[in-house]
Image (cartoon, rainbow, N blue to C red):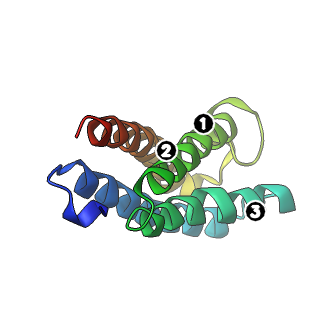
Amino acid sequence: MGMHRSANPMGKWVAAIVMIHFAVTAVHGLAHAEAHVPLSPAANLFVFGVILAGPLIGLIMIRRTPRAGAWLIAASMAAAFVFGFVNHFIVASPDHIAHVDLRWRTLFAATAVLLAITEVLGAGLAIRWLKLRGQQ
């Protein structure tokens, strides 16, 4: 049974947070570009493969293979949170919120915080949805 047919509304919340996360990621990417914050090739691969594609692929998968799709959402969102938290708030680098060009710092920092929030929510909601589905 796919997410859209479930009596549990948690699936709709998971889908909503994935889409919100995608939108925030796009705005954060704009701030990265405008502030000239470079990413290594490996970081770019992680951003596109895990942070952007992972949750969206999980959302697509959830219709045919709900458990695998939800686990992909949870894992990619958790990995995205760790990556973003370390790079935006801990490691002193051009990607740290305190080192971004002052003209773009507010948008960069706000979207970094929103990414962290949506990633924690996305991972948590996907895991909660899995647990609720297991009880049905």
Q: Which residue is mark 2?
A: 74
Question: Dot 2, crowdedness within 10 Å: few (<14), some or many (≥20)?
Answer: many
Q: Give the farthest residue toward the left.
A: 7
Q: Which residue is mark 1?
A: 85
Q: Is residue 52 left or right of residue 12?
A: right
Label 2 element class: helix
Cα–Cα span, label 1 and label 3: 16 Å
| Residue in the image at 40% along x and 58% along y | 18
Mark positioned earlier in the residue sequence (3 or 2) = 3
Residue 116 in view here? yes
Q: Position of residue 17 (x, y in %)?
A: 34, 54
Q: Position of residue 32 (x, y in %)?
A: 63, 62
Q: Which residue is mark 3?
A: 44
Amino acid bearing label 1: Phe
In the image shown, does 63 or 77 lie closer to the viewer?
63
Amino acid bearing label 3: Asn
Between circles 3 and 2, the one closer to the viewer is 2
Label 3 element class: helix
In the image shown, does 49 or 68 lie closer to the viewer?
68
